[in-house]
Amino acid sequence: MNLLINNIIILSTLLITTVACDNSTGKKENSNSIKKENKVTIPSFNSDSAYYYIKRQIDFGPRVPNMSSHKQCAKYLTETLNRFSDTVYIQETTATAFDGTNLNLINIIGSFNPENRNRILLAAHWDTRPFADKDPNPDNFYTPIDGANDGASGVAVLLEIARLLSKTHIEIGVDIILFDGEDYGVHSKHENKYKDDTWALGSQYWSKNPHISNYNARFGILLDMVGAYEATFKHEGYSMYYAPNIVRKVWETARHSGFEDYFINRKGGFIMDDHYYINKYRNIPTINIIHQEASTEHGFFKYWHTTEDTIDKICKNTLNAVGQTVVNIIFQE
C-alpha cells in the first residue's frame, strides 16, 4: 500500500528499557528516557548511583543530631550538593527536643537556577532516629538506628537527581532541601508521647525561616522511606488535603512511567511529616511519597524505627521507580 504523506510530524518517543534489580521483587521495572517535542531528553535515573549514596550515608553511622557521625555526614552532603548545584545554602539552628535535649540542627539546601521564580521544591530528611523504640528487642529501645530506608533512601534519590540536573539543562528552578531533626520525635515509651510538634524540627524551622526571604515554589515533593522491597505508596492524607492536584499529577506520571505496582491509587493514612509544616507554615502545596504498609501494626515499612533498618533492606527497583517518576515530573514542568 502506498501512502502519500504531506507532513511529517515528529512525536515524542518513549524509550523504555527494563531495569533489573539484583534482588528480584517479581515486578516489572521501567526506566524511562523521554524525548519531548523541544528535543530535550529526560535522563534515566541511575539506581546503582542512588544505592551508593545510601551506603555513603550509613557508613558514617547513625546521623543523630549532636553526634560526631551527624557532623561528618553533614559535611559529606554539603560537599556533594556543592558539586552538583548552582548554589548551596546551609541553615544552622538549635531546637529543644521533647526530653529537653538541645539539638544542633543543619538544613542543607541545593538550588538550581536560583534566579528563576518558577520553582519546584524536593525534600527529604537526612537525620536518623535516635531510638529503636519499635524494635522487637526491648534492649534496643534507646539504640540509634542506621536508617537506610528511613532517611537515607530519600536523600539518596535526591542526590542522584541533583547529579542528573547538573548534567542536563533545565528551564525551571529546583530546590533540593535536606531537613534535619525530623526523627527526634517523642519516644513511644515516654510519658508525654502524645505531645504535638516534637517531630520534623528542621522543617518547622525552615518553614518559618526559609533560606531565601519570602521563598515560594509552585509545589513540593517530599520523599520518606522510598527504598524498601515491595514498597507501596498510597495517597497520604495531608497530601490529599493540601495538594490533591499534585498527588494526581505524580501518581498519573508514575502510571505512565510503568510504576503502577508501586504508586497505588488508594487512600493512605495521615502522616505528620516534614510536608505537613511546609503546607501549614509556608503555604506551598507539598505531597509526601512515603511507604505505607497495611500489614504492619504501625502502618509503615516493616523495619521502621528498629535496628534492622539496614542497607540489605534496600531494593534498587524501588529507588528507580521513585527516582524516575520524580525526574519525569521535573522535565514535564
Image (spheres, rainbow, N blue to C red):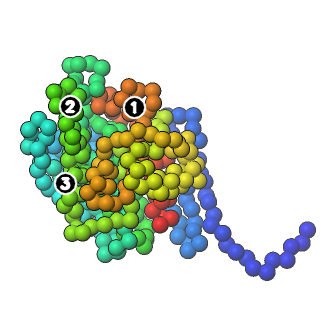
Q: Dot 1: few (<14), some (14–19), or many (≥20) neighbours within 10 Å? A: some
The local crowd at label 2, few if under 14, some if 14 to 19, many if 20 or more residues have their Cα within 10 Å, is: few
Residue 258: image x %, image y %?
Answer: 58, 49
Residue 31 pos. (x, y %) = 54, 51
Looking at the image, residue 312 sits to the left or right of residue 234; the answer is left
Asked if the residue under mark 2 is in contact with the one under mark 3, i.e. CB atoms within 8 Å, the reply is: no
Q: What residue type is labelled 2?
A: Lys
Residue 76 in view, yes or no? no
Q: Which of marks 3 and 2 is nearer the N terminus?
A: 2
Taking the image as shown, residue 97 lies to the left or right of residue 136, namely left
Q: How many marks?
A: 3
Left or right: 257 in relation to 61 = right
Pair 3/2: label in front: 2
Instruction: Give the labeled residue for mark 2.
Output: 193
Mark 3 crowd level (few <14, some 14–19, many ≥20, 10 Å Cα): many
Q: Look at 57% across and 50% down and name the residue there.
A: 255
Please, is residue 266 above or below residue 240 in the view? above
Task: Using the numbered discs, state the Cα–Cα distance from disc 3 to disc 2 in whole angstroms.
Answer: 21 Å
Which residue is identified by label 1? 299
- Asked whether the beta carbons under mark 1 and mark 3 sit within 8 Å of each other, the answer is no
Residue type at tag 3: Tyr
89 relative to 140, above or below: below
Task: Describe the element under mark 1 as helix, strand or loop.
Answer: loop
Which amino acid type corresponds to the residue marked 1 in the rendered image?
A: Gly
Q: Name the residue under label 3.
A: 205
Furthest-right residue in view?
1
Query: Which residue is painted at 36% across and 51% down in the image?
Result: 222
Q: What element carries label 2?
A: loop
Q: Which mark is residue 226?
A: none
